[in-house]
Amino acid sequence: MLISEVRPTTIDGVKRLASQLRKRKGLKHSEALDHAAKAAGCSNFAHASRSLPTKRFSSRELLVFFTTYWSDNERRFQCGRETLRIQLTRPLAELCNRHLLKSARGFGNLRMVAEDHFVCDSIAPSQDYARAGLCTAARSLQFIEATGLLPDRNPRKLEPRSLSGEILPGRDHATFWVDPSNGQRFFIDEPYESRALEAERTAWADCHGWRVEKASWPGIYRPYECDLYVAVDGRSGSDIDSLLRSVNSMADPSITENWDGESTASWETFVSPMATTAQAKRRAKCKGMIYPEASLKTVPYNFARGTSQRRPIGELGIKGHIEAGRIIKAAIGSEFAPAAGYMRLGSLRADLEDWFCLEIGPEQRQRPEFFQVYYGETDEDKAFRQTLRTRADLIAWLQSLKGKLLEAYPDCAPLRRQLGRIEMAMSMIEKANASVPGAP
């Protein structure tokens, strides 16, 4: 084929043609790129960069698989596997990275085991439950692909509230989204029986300068049972009409009643096409099917959720847990802890409460004074919080908490995870301190 007959359809193709033009015609690199872009039907290379895909993908690279295993004790211990296949128009990595996907509805219990495969590590209690979870994840991915929006990690930047704190009437099953191209933020609301509140919601929007528009697409949360509304602060200049057109033009959502996935009556592990290595095939195994055993330094727990967690062998003791809870509650309630540090301390508190309950046993666990060790606030907790007058005080107490944990438990991954949360919280508090002039 003559070089003049080449018609690139991807950016990689434009670059290859530009390289040939540069060598044959002695053009500058930028000139060759523009000539190659015109051969692809674009005005210049910048136009091609906006219009053409980076490369041509095979059909295999445009498939995504979701898998859940289930066991139904009420049906004579029947079990099986459900796998739903989704065809995309672009590779998953171009739509949304795996970290942001964890914030999308339906993805919270899914683990990415290959570039084209997500597995739920919890064993579902029934076949219908398994299918419903996979359909929810598929609808979220469908929404992301059609709209170009991504889950918003900073929902506080778009809270549908009035200045007095009044929230949108009937708000339910809320999710927050952001347009990565311009930073515009949108609020998706999916309430039940919204018609009864239609007038009240409209009045709220008019009063507070918001736009709340109902979409015709059935929704992500529970299609055909809830209505989907797109809401945005009218003062933000967000293009809600364009978003609504994208949402309303979407294909019918995946639902269990129209299940078109693969169902098997066994727990045979599903391996996706892109899981080509031995390690990738091992990752594909559902953790809920692996029976955990104690090691020299850790013991498993939390089997009820289908997957187990691990805690260190050893005990902090009742007194130690009370002191740990007091420090964490004071830190979380302190004015010196930034929001990101609050999140780390909240995760630390949740895990340490689990360890505490397992250490004291089920009988003592029911004693009312133990309910307030990590949550709630006693008079002693209030008095202790008054002693934290500076960031340095808070950091010192968090450092002492770290020491208590090191003394009580052996070095192991579960302990190191908690120590890392403490260290990260202290680092964030120190950085917040450095950003405030004259702060103690």
Image (cartoon, rainbow, N blue to C red):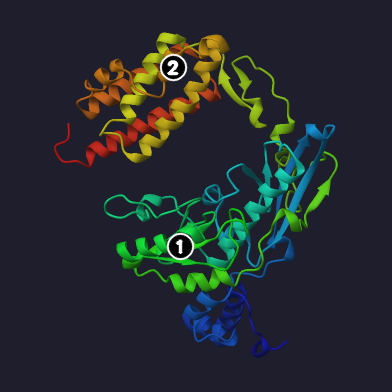
Amino acid type for the residue under numbered disc 1: Glu
The x, y position of residue 403, in whole percent, is 39, 16
Note whether residue 329 is visible: yes
Quadrant of the snapshot with the C terminus = top left
The crowding category of the residue bearing disc 1, from other C-alpha atoms within 10 Å (few below 14, some 14 to 19, many at least 20), is: some
> What residue would you read off at disc 2?
405
> What residue would you read off at disc 1?
198
Amino acid type for the residue under numbered disc 2: Leu
Residue at point 54%, 51% (across, down): 104
Q: How many labels does the image show?
A: 2
Note whether residue 184 is visible: no
Residue at point 46%, 9% (across, down): 317
The x, y position of residue 68, in whole percent, is 72, 43
Residue at point 48%, 12% (across, down): 367
Secondary structure at badge 2 equals helix
The x, y position of residue 79, in whole percent, is 81, 37
The x, y position of residue 251, in whole percent, is 65, 68
Above or below, 338 relative to 357: below
Locate residue 22 relative to residue 206 in the image: left or right: right
Locate residue 116 relative to residue 369 in the image: left or right: right
Q: Nearer the viewer, residue 194 or 413?
A: 194
Tag shown at residue 219: none
Q: Which of 438 and 346 is in front in this view?
A: 346
Q: Which of marks 2 and 1 is in front?
A: 1
Residue lying farthest left? Answer: 438
